[in-house]
Amino acid sequence: AIADAIEEALKSNTHIDREKKVLPLKGKKALITAGPTREPIDPVRYLSNHSSGKQGFAIAAALAELGAEVTLISGPVHLPCPIGVNRIDIETAEEMMGAVQDALPSDVFISVAAVADWRPAECASLKVKKDKQTDGPPPLMLIENPDILKTVSHMEQGRPELVIGFAAETNDVVENARAKRLRKECDWIVANDVSGDVMGGDHNVMILVTADTETEWPRLDKQAAARKLAAKISEALTGH
Amino acid sequence: AIADAIEEALKSNTHIDREKKVLPLKGKKALITAGPTREPIDPVRYLSNHSSGKQGFAIAAALAELGAEVTLISGPVHLPCPIGVNRIDIETAEEMMGAVQDALPSDVFISVAAVADWRPAECASLKVKKDKQTDGPPPLMLIENPDILKTVSHMEQGRPELVIGFAAETNDVVENARAKRLRKECDWIVANDVSGDVMGGDHNVMILVTADTETEWPRLDKQAAARKLAAKISEALTGH
């Protein structure tokens, strides 16, 4: 009898999730980047950015829950792949750029990853030995990484209908976000104030900056913030 | 009856572990560093080294199993603290150096951590903006971090009886390890060939370099390698 009850409960749950629930993003494709990138200096050393990947993974999950076909391109993080999401793991910004291009076209592109702006100009194939540097460590020469958000925003053919960037800011949050939106030519910027405990934490205060609105959301856990953003995306793409 | 049997089994297990088992390192203190360090460039960017922390955590666990009082100073890793080990988390090489000095004296010091040799000469308090760098990214000026292994090896008062370093090498493994042992003035170097899949993986090929021996161990999982090293340490400190 208990087994029957469990089976019944599972059935009705499946029923709700898979059949009766409104899936406004069914038939839509979403492409999301998440986590940090790692830029090798030599076989043991690298440059990176703080990023747990939690917010990007939560957004991928929230869009999948609304029925979207979701591809998640992730840097090195310690998170399980959300249910129903196609995950592709990469390390460097260049690999992320390549994976994004391979995964397009998409109806919406959301750049949540903390992509390293710069990478070492050269990657040594052998470990650079400290004791060989008689005059102290040599300066690390850097070059610019591809700008993934800008590249996708500027696509002449097949640009996603909605291109969304994230801006992790420690100061002048809204001003920096507004400037970033114009510079990248993306549709929305979600600004994060990372001066507190956001990075790696479970909560987020986000400000959504569009062409004509700036909306500060209350402090939410990353799942709730993701669902709020997913609902906004659904509204923009489908009208509901 | 089943409950009784389980209780009996648990009792006898406890009995073996806690009372009858020989604990050759009882009364000895062991200090271990593990994992990478992270050296901040600004609030979002950092320099680091590849290191999962697995080998250092396994050595801490193996020494605790032999009865040692173990302190484990760890950089950012995703590992649970081994049973019976006192864990202290740090981020930078300077913080690790301070934590080591606070935790001394100890009978044995094992430097397994992948400590960053260099750190940015300056850490910006605000995120360095890419678009403000009109001539491309500025070179990253580096300075030397404290050499924790060398500092402990050179202690005039209260030097641990046994000081052991690890050497992650991609080439000329034994030659580099031998040179490192002399340069750091530590007692033993455990050399790792990291040109393969060691880093983050579950196996390790280690070569133990002492003043008068060089012994290559077979490919072992990191737990088995740790127990082998712990047994060697016990032999050196206690004669059994």
Image (cartoon, coloured by chain):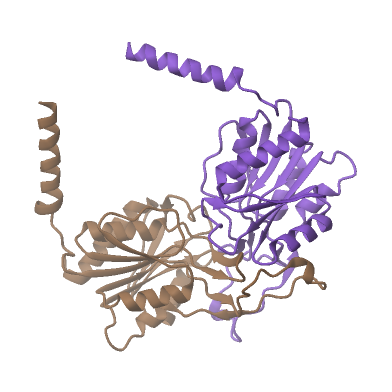
Chain colours: A purple, B brown
Depth order, front residue of B137/A189 = A189
Whether residue B181 is visible, yes or no, is no
- Measured from the top left, where is residue A224 in percent x and y? 57, 42
Seen as rendered, the residue at the extreme right is A156
Whether residue A179 is visible, yes or no, is yes
On screen, residue A34 versus residue B115, left or right, reads right
Depth order, front residue of A210/A194 = A210
Depth order, front residue of A54/B213 = A54
- Measured from the top left, where is residue B122 in percent x and y? 61, 79
Which quadrant holds the C terminus of chain B?
bottom left
* Above or below for A237 versus A164: above
Quarter of the image holding residue B164? bottom left
* Above or below for A129 versus A196: below
On screen, residue B162 versus residue A84, left or right, reads left
The residue depicted at 66 percent of the width and 25 percent of the height is A23
The residue depicted at 36 percent of the width and 75 percent of the height is B100
Seen as rendered, the residue at the extreme bottom is B156
Depth order, front residue of B84/A30 = A30
On screen, residue B144 versus residue B224, left or right, reads right
- Measured from the top left, where is residue A31 in percent x and y? 71, 40
Total marks placed: 0
Which quadrant holds the N terminus of chain B?
top left
On screen, residue A198 versus residue B186, left or right, reads right
* Above or below for B52 versus A164: below
- Measured from the top left, where is residue B118 in percent x and y? 55, 76
